Each structure stands twice: as C-alpha cells, then as structure tokens.
Amino acid sequence: MDSSSALLLSQEMEACIKCGACLAVCPTYEEERMESYGPRGRVQIAGKLFLNELKVAPGATNKLTSCIDCKACVVACPRGVELDTLFNAAKEKIAFFRGMGIFNRWIASGVFWGWPLYPALKVLDLLRRIFYEAIPMFPGLEKVFPFIRNGKKRKLPPVAGSSFYRQFPKIVQPMDSIRRVMFFPGCVINFSDTEIGKSTVEVLSHYGIEVVLPPLQLCCGIPLISMGEKKTAQKLALKNIDMMEKLNVEAVITSCASCAYTFKKEYPSLLADFPVFGSTDPQVGGDKAVRFADKVWDIHEFLQQTVDYRKGLGSVDQSVTFHDPCHLKRGLGVSESPRQILQAIPGLRFKEMEEADRCCGFGGIFSLKHYDLAMKVAEKKVSRIEENGSEVVATGCPGCSLHIGDALFQAGKKVEVKHTVQILAESIQNHKKNRQQPVAIEERKKDEVFH
C-alpha cells in the first residue's frame, strides 16, 4: 500500500466517531450481536492491522470477510466515512501477508484468465450431481458437505450445458437497428443462469438495438477486490477496458448490478494511480477507467432513460414485488427504474415489499465462506417476501436471484425469483403472440371459403 493510500485510510479511520449509527443497519451485526461483526468493530480491527498492532490471524480475517459489502453502513454514516474502502484495504493487507490460499488462488486464476473457469465449473457440476444431490440425507451429512442447513441441502445453481456466449453470434442485429451497444453478462449469467442473458438480448433487440458480445468473457473482477487481490484486479480491469474500447459501441450494458457497480465505481478508484504499459503518466489508467465508466449502464436505467420501454408490451398476469440489490440501489443509486418498467407491463400487479432494499445475504464469496450467516440474513428477506404475498420476486442481480431462490427453497416457499428483463421479455413475447393470433384466424377463414 503506497503512502498516499495509507494517509487516506488514516483520515477515514479518524473521521469515525464511533457513534454506532452503522450498527443499526448492518445485517451481520443484527444476526450475531457482536461488535466485531459490525462496521464499528471492523474499523477497529482494520486500524490495528494498518498500525501493525494486530497480527494477521484467522480471527481478524474472518471478521473482515464476514462483511457482505451491502454498503448500508456507508449510507448511514453521518460523517461520510467510506467504510467499504477501509475494509477492502484491510483485506488487501491480509492477502499480502497471509497469501490467498488454494481456494482463493483458484478463483483468482479463473477470474483473471477466463477460459479455465467454465471447464472447471463443469467438473464441479458433475461432482455436485454425483456426490451431492444423489446422496440422500442422513444424520451427520452436514459435516461432510458445508452447504446443508436445517436438514436441507443448499440449492446449488447448475452450470449451463452451454455457456451464454456459445448460444449467440458475436453480433445480434435486429432489422432497422438504430443503436449499437455491448452486452456484458458477467459470470453467473454466462455460466449458469443463461436465461437472463437471452432475455436481455431479446429485450434490446425488441427496441431496435444491435447487441455486440465481447470476444472473450472475463469477470468484472469484484471477487478479486473482495479477496484483497488488488494488483490482479487492476490488471483485469485494464484487460476489460482495452477489450471493450475496441468494439466501437456507444454503451456497455450489463444485467448484473455487481458488474455495473464494479465498472462504474470500483474501476476509477482501482486504476486512479495505476500506470498503463507504454506510458509514464500514472493518471492514464484512471482516465481510461473514468471514460469507460461513463459508457456503462445497468439494464434497468438504460431502458428507462434511452428507449420507449412501454412499446410493444403484452399482458403478464402475475403479482410481482421487487428486491433491491445492494450494488444497484446503494451502489449505483438505481431504484425507480426497475419499478417503472414493471409497473408499465399490462396485467402485472406490482406490490411494494417492506424493506425491499434490505440485503438478502448473498455478497458473492461471502455466502461461500459464511453460508450459515448468509442464510440467517436471508431469512429476514424470506419473511418480507411471505408477508408481501406476491407470486414472483423480481430483482436486478443474478447473485441475489440465486441466493433468494435458495433461501425460499430452504423455507419451503413456492415463490419464483426472476430478473426484471425476464418478465419484460415475457411481456414482449405475449404481445407478439397476440398480434399473430388474429392473422392465423383470418387465414383459417380464407381456407374455409375456398374449400
């Protein structure tokens, strides 16, 4: 960590007045009721790590990695302390002194290089089906598999038979296309929930937008940031920016709130003083990141602000509520766009959920390392969904969709979880069907006359 970064972090820690406003909104503190599981306690741990007053040991590491990065504390802090920046810096120091371990190193390698990730996930998916789902529940099984809770196995997401990129050409060009954008699906959509990607392309094509898919799928890099692997994250950010700059598009669209947040908020700070190869100016990396961030749009905001999203919609007879992903609402400030899109769909009955922006407990790697805690946090979300009574929970994050789906499954609740674009795509499909039906009836009448 350079001297300027250390000074900035020191100022941030001094700005904390230990008022406890952050504790009232922290989902992990609410569940554990321990100071070290809340933002105020984590600030103290981070401070002692920076001052070398605390050894980089598992106890400190676990408390910092138990932060979901929901950013509720950042919004609640009356002094405007960038608590998320502090915690990421502490994770960076931990990664530097302790190393990343085999599991984290494997994730980092797959995230950075891209290509090894899908084959590895396919192998893991095979093992999931053979050694996880096929084995019946018996006492003590939770000691063998970590993802078992209350006598139920975690609903692990399947790996797609074919990745999203293999299902589409590199350019999807509708007739009379008026605009050209790039769609960045992110890892979950590319490798697992490809239906969200298909719906996104269908929706963009419906509004006359040419969709370009990047030639090489890489992760946005947020797992690296959350693991404290800053240098690798910086290199990955530059790879992504350089690749996307060559595509000659007016915008970069993503249907993953975490990817959009990483591109727009993390990249500029990540590359602020990062020198680019061939340049001696340390500001070049930051300038590239800022220019790139200006072109990035979350799918909801893009549709709501740049197209007539009410055009060509058919009826969807469902009651729907919306869960605000943390990176979407608190990270990007986007909350009204998805609601306006859903409320524009004919026949859809939208009902606001209490505490719609309360964290679901996913947090990416957090839910892998702290599954029990993640599920405790998710129980509150399940309660709110049950109180709401809607048939479908819409959201703007594939990760949230997976985690909420698992939590509902664990609770025995039959509520669907969909991305907003999936519901919008269904509405568009219904409109097309309704337009085709009268034509089919007319053709049948002609046949009857001639026969």
Image (cartoon, rainbow, N blue to C red):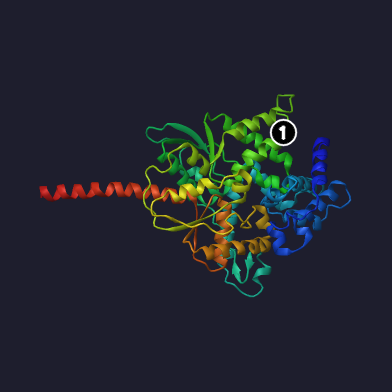
Which residue does the numbered mark 1 point to in the structure image? 272
**Relative to residue 82, is residue 160 drawn left or right?**
left
**Relative to residue 5, is residue 28 drawn left or right?**
left
Q: Is residue 219 visible?
A: no
Does 96 sit above or below residue 360?
above
Does 270 sit above or below residue 329?
above
Mark 1: secondary structure: loop
Q: Residue 179's spot in the image, x, y percent?
A: 45, 32
Q: What residue do we see at 61% from left, 33% from top?
A: 292
Q: Nearer the viewer, residue 412 or 47?
A: 47
Does 308 sit above or below residue 398?
above
Answer few, some or many: residues within 10 Å of disc 1's Cα (few below 14, many 20 plus, some between 14 and 19): some
Give residue 82's quadrant in the image. Answer: top right
Give residue 311's quadrant in the image. Answer: top left
**Relative to residue 383, is residue 309 drawn left or right?**
left
Q: Residue 92's spot in the image, x, y percent?
A: 77, 45
Does 340 sit above or below residue 212?
below
Q: What residue do we see at 54% from left, 49% from top?
A: 396
Q: Residue 317's spot in the image, x, y percent?
A: 39, 57
Image quadrant where one finds the N terminus: top right
Q: What residue do we see at 50% from left, 42% from top?
A: 165
**Relative to residue 226, is residue 348 drawn left or right?**
left
Q: Residue 341's spot in the image, x, y percent?
A: 46, 47
Q: Nearer the viewer, residue 45 or 333?
A: 333
Give residue 31's quadrant in the image. Answer: bottom right
Instruction: Report how many numbered discs are placed on residues in the image.
Output: 1
Q: Nearer the viewer, residue 432 or 23?
A: 23
Question: Extreme bottom residue here?
Answer: 139
